[in-house]
């Protein structure tokens, strides 16, 4: 092509371009990209900040030691569950995890699960049969677990379809099977890690199978940040972050007024009510019974309370209602085993009267205890009786309960000492470190780690061998507590809850022979009755008979069901619609749909 031809072509291109520039150009067709994460400024994540009481010792929803509203929130939003309960406590299949779950055989009783093919952990590993196996094995083998009786009936867990289908076989028909395999944990990360059942979950959850994942846990600041799980296969969360921030009840009002928090889930009480007075606009408060019951366990396998008569006498000396009124006046009085007072079907079963002073004295004398006068301390084997009460160091409310019990027993001539070991040790170990409560955690108003009845020589810096034993004996291997403050989770099935709390913890045919419960309680005949309660057709009067026998055995004294309160503003109500939620999943149920407040 010659030079002249190039010049002509360039001229024609220039003319076309000029003509086009003089014509209106229609805007390009743009399809908006839907986003679930509106932000106020580029790069600024949207978030909702919720005030909470405190952070638990760990975040394993299957450990008694970790029972708390915060652990419940993380289990609801981060961990996968095959079934979730509705407002009426009825288990409903979560189809994001399993597309089908049903009984497929009666001999042996078998439940088959077909898992959602898209369901995966935030590590990209599939949610699969190995997660079922891991939870089953740990629930029947580990001490200090919650609501384990149903898992102990399982004899085999088998994988199909490359791990995306599971067959679970039981030794007996089990009608409450829908409540199993909630809060699944990532087996691929935990199964081979020593101590991972406790240690790996102390400061978060290592993987998510839900809409949120744990971004960070800062115990120093008292803050947990949940962030959107970008690998979640269902509808994404609306906000980028959900922040749980530790606040004292009296600081909630200041946080709401300043905008530092958007709402709160905190302990109900006079301090909170006083702090909220004058806040405008007036916040809305909704009572939220916790999914737990605070109880007092009496050690039945060792120490002075292994004697039934002594145990019954000590139980009769404890005024349960006075403890509730002193420690948690807003709480619901608990007078039954297995169900929390706010659960459907709850009926009080406690005896109408406590033993009087003469009956208590007769029981203690039957146990071999003596006293020289009505005001003298009780003796056994020639020495003053001393009882040790354990309460988790991380639980200030439990320490207040323990102090109240110690005062009551001391006033009745039975000196008692409060020790505060780590709560995971208290609930799972036979002996604990004889650690007194810290100064900051120790209750006031006369409640001390060592009650007034302790001997005067206990204050001597260097006791000689002839002096009385110290209030907290220092033993290299620790000490066994005689009573302990327990936090029992509310379960989906009452019969399973009773068998989990008081059964002999026998394993399945392929499992361990025995895993001790926190109090060491085991009555084989009663254990058989509790197992029958979990079957499809127990005798009509059996539940009441078991309740009466448990009260008679005095293995544990239910005290109260704590009550929190949801505090919200008109703006946070409109953005979240927050409410109490179902008991077993709590007020954070549906938080993945919460929208940011206008000021966020």
Image (cartoon, rainbow, N blue to C red):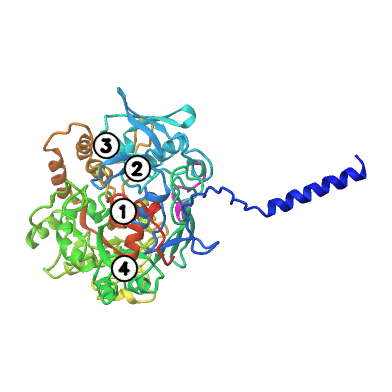
Where is residue 379? Give x, y as percent: 20, 63
Which type of secondary structure does the marked residue at label 2 adopt? loop
Which type of secondary structure does the marked residue at label 3 adopt? loop
Q: Nearer the viewer, mark 2 or mark 3?
A: 3
Q: Nearer the viewer, residue 308 or 100?
A: 100
> Tag 3: Cα neighbours inside 10 Å, few (<14), some, or many (≥20)?
some
Dot placed on the residue nearer the N-terminal end, 2 or 3: 3
Q: Which mark is residue 471?
A: 4
Dot placed on the residue nearer the N-terminal end, 2 or 1: 2
Dot placed on the residue nearer the N-terminal end, 3 or 1: 3
What segment carries the magenta color?
A: 191-204
Which residue was labeled with disc 3? 176
The quadrant of the picture occupied by the C terminus is bottom left
Q: State whether residue 562 is above or below residue 139.
A: below
Give the CA distance from mark 4 to mark 1: 41 Å
Q: Nearer the viewer, mark 3 or mark 1?
A: 1
Give the CA distance from mark 2 to mark 3: 22 Å
């Amino acid at each position: 092509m010659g030079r002249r031809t190039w010049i002509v072509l360039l001229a024609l291109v220039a003319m076309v371009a000029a003509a086009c520039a003089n014509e209106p150009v229609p805007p390009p067709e743009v399809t908006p990209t839907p986003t679930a994460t509106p932000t106020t400024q580029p790069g600024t994540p949207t978030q909702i900040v919720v005030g909470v009481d405190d952070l638990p010792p760990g975040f394993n929803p299957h450990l008694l030691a970790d029972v708390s509203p915060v652990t419940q929130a993380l289990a609801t939003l981060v961990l996968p569950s095959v079934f979730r309960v509705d407002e009426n406590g009825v288990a409903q299949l979560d189809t994001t995890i399993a597309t089908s779950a049903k009984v497929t055989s009666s001999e042996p009783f078998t439940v088959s699960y077909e898992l959602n093919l898209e369901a995966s952990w935030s590590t990209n590993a599939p949610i699969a049969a190995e997660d079922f196996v891991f939870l089953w094995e740990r629930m029947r083998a580990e001490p200090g677990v919650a609501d384990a009786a149903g898992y102990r009936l399982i004899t085999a867990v088998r994988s199909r379809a490359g791990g995306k289908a599971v067959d679970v076989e039981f030794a007996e028909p089990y009608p409450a099977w829908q409540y199993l395999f909630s809060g699944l944990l990532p087996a691929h990360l935990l199964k081979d890690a020593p101590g991972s059942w406790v240690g790996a979950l102390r400061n978060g959850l290592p993987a998510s199978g839900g809409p949120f994942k744990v971004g960070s846990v800062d115990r120093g600041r008292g803050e947990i940040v949940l962030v959107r799980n970008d690998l979640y296969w269902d509808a994404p969360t609306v906000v980028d972050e959900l922040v749980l921030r530790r606040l004292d009840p009296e600081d909630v009002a200041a946080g709401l007024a300043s905008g530092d928090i958007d709402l709160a889930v905190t302990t109900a009480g006079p301090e909170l009510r006083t702090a909220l007075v004058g806040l405008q606009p007036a916040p809305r408060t909704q009572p939220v019974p916790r999914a737990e019951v605070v109880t007092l366990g009496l050690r039945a396998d060792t120490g002075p309370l292994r004697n039934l008569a002594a145990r019954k006498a000590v139980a009769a000396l404890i005024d349960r209602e006075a403890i509730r009124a002193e420690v948690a006046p807003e709480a619901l009085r608990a007078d039954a085993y297995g169900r929390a007072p706010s659960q459907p079907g709850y009926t009080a079963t406690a005896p109408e009267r406590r033993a009087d002073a003469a009956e208590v004295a007769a029981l203690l004398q039957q146990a071999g205890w003596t006293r020289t006068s009505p005001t003298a301390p009780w003796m056994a084997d020639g020495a003053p009786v001393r009882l040790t009460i354990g309460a988790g160091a991380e639980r200030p409310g439990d320490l207040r309960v323990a102090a109240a019990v110690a005062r009551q027993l001391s006033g009745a001539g039975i000196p008692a000492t409060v020790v505060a070991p780590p709560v995971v040790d208290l609930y799972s170990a036979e002996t604990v470190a004889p650690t007194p409560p810290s100064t900051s955690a120790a209750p006031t108003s006369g409640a001390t780690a060592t009650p007034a009845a302790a001997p005067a020589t206990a204050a001597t810096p260097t006791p000689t061998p002839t002096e009385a034993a110290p209030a907290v004996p220092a033993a290299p291997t620790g000490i066994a507590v005689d009573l302990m403050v327990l936090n029992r989770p509310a379960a989906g099935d009452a019969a399973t809850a009773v068998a989990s709390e008081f059964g002999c913890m026998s394993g399945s045919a392929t499992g361990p022979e025995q895993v001790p419960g926190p109090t060491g309680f085991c009555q084989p005949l009663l254990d058989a009755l509790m197992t029958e309660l979990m079957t499809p057709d127990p005798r009509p009067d059996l539940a009441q008979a078991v309740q009466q026998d448990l009260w008679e055995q005095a293995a544990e004294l239910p005290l109260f069901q704590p009550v929190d309160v949801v505090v919200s503003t008109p703006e946070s109500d409109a953005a979240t619609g927050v409410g109490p939620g179902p008991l077993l999943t709590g007020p954070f149920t549906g938080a993945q749909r919460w929208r940011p407040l206008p000021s966020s």
